[in-house]
Image (cartoon, rainbow, N blue to C red):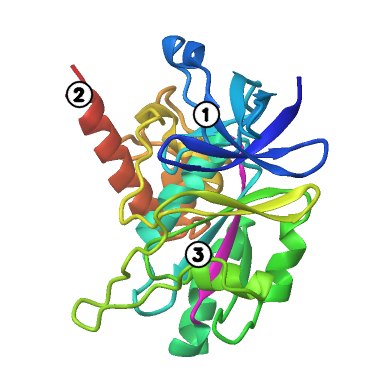
């Protein structure tokens, strides 16, 4: 039975790349998958049966390395978080949520600061310095001119990469520039509210070479991390996590307790204050949700 990779899903019709010859086959899931409450998603490695009319039927979903609910994808190895320097303005709260989520899912994160032509270099470097000091790779790009595209391409090799970020930050433009072709519809920015208009309506994997794919996903203005428990959140803020063992109390929330290793590191300016404040905000949100879960 041939194996394939799901590269898109529109109205429950799955485009599958045959691993043997690279041909694209339109498939539907077998009924037993619905009975087992398993839904195929983009990124799934599957087995399928060929039909006489040239279509296929997905018979089995192979084991997933990871699964992301929003956007629904599996087997992601890398996420490039695209942050616009202006129009829309940088959303660092969303970026920190995304970074924590990537750490939680064991997915390699890369930060892309886009639209560098619209902001002063000092402001761009201020953001870049915060995350580079933590240990994250930061790439500065101008998707319209192609600046920084070569750097991004180096990171795409042998990865299934997702570009993630708010609508209007330039994800589709970056992809178009990478492929030197119009693969996705570039969004427009509303002059009225300076927010992006979402133009990507479904998740699609674009093939770069035999082992490299890049996904364009629908833009979104929120990013939920409710899979992470509040007590574990600090583990996924990598700049905070290395100080957890310095806390006096087991189960320290790193907010109200005395003799907290993270708070001491903050006082010694070893942790960025904005990152710590984001942690506190997200911790309280997660804790509040947990208290009202039932």
Magenta stretch secondary structure, dominant: strand
Q: Specify the segment rendered in magenta.
A: 106-115
Mark 1 vs mark 2: in front: 1
Residue 28: which numbered mark, if any? 1
Q: Crowding near pointer 1: few (<14 within 10 Å), some, many (20+)?
A: some
Q: Crowding near pointer 3: few (<14 within 10 Å), some, many (20+)?
A: many
The quarter in which the N terminus is drawn is top right
Question: In the image as oriented, which residue stretches furthest toward the front?
Answer: 53
Residue 148 in percent (x, y) is at 66, 77
User: Is 16 rendered above or below residue 35?
Assistant: below
The quarter in which the C terminus is drawn is top left
Residue 199 in percent (x, y) is at 38, 64
What residue would you read off at disc 3?
82
Query: What's the residue at 39%, 72% (across, down)?
Result: 187
Residue 220: which numbered mark, if any? none
Mark 2 vs mark 3: in front: 3
User: Is 230 rendered above or below residue 172?
Assistant: above
What residue would you read off at disc 2?
291
Check residue 191 for magenta coloring: no
- Could you tell me which secondary element the residue under label 3 belongs to? strand
Query: What's the residue at 50%, 15% (across, down)?
Result: 33
């Amino acid at each position: 039975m041939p194996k394939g990779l799901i590269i898109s899903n529109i109205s429950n019709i799955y485009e599958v790349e045959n691993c043997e010859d690279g041909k694209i086959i339109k498939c539907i899931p077998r009924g037993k998958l619905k009975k087992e409450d398993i839904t195929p998603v983009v990124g799934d490695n599957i087995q399928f049966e060929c039909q006489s009319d040239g279509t296929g039927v997905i018979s089995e979903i192979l084991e997933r390395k990871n699964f992301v609910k929003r956007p629904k994808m599996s087997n992601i190895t890398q996420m490039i978080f695209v942050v616009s320097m202006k129009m829309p303005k940088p959303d660092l709260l969303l970026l920190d949520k995304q970074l924590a989520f990537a750490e939680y899912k064991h997915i390699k994160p890369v930060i892309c600061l886009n639209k560098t032509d619209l902001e002063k270099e000092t402001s761009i470097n201020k953001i870049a310095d915060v995350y580079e000091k933590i240990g994250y790779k930061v790439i500065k790009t101008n998707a319209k001119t192609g600046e920084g595209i070569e750097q991004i391409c180096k990171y795409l090799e042998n990865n299934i990469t997702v570009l993630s970020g708010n609508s209007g930050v330039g994800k589709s433009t970056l992809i178009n520039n990478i492929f030197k072709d119009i693969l996705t519809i570039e969004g427009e920015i509303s002059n009225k509210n300076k927010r992006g208009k979402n133009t990507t309506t479904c998740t699609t994997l674009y093939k770069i070479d035999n082992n490299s794919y890049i996904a364009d996903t629908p833009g979104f203005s929120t990013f939920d991390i409710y899979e992470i428990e509040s007590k574990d959140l600090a583990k996924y803020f990598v700049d905070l996590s290395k100080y957890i063992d310095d806390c006096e109390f087991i189960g320290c929330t790193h907010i109200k307790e005395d003799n907290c290793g993270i708070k001491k590191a903050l006082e010694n300016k070893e942790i960025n204050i904005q990152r710590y404040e984001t942690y506190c905000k997200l911790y309280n949100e997660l804790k509040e949700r947990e208290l009202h879960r039932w």
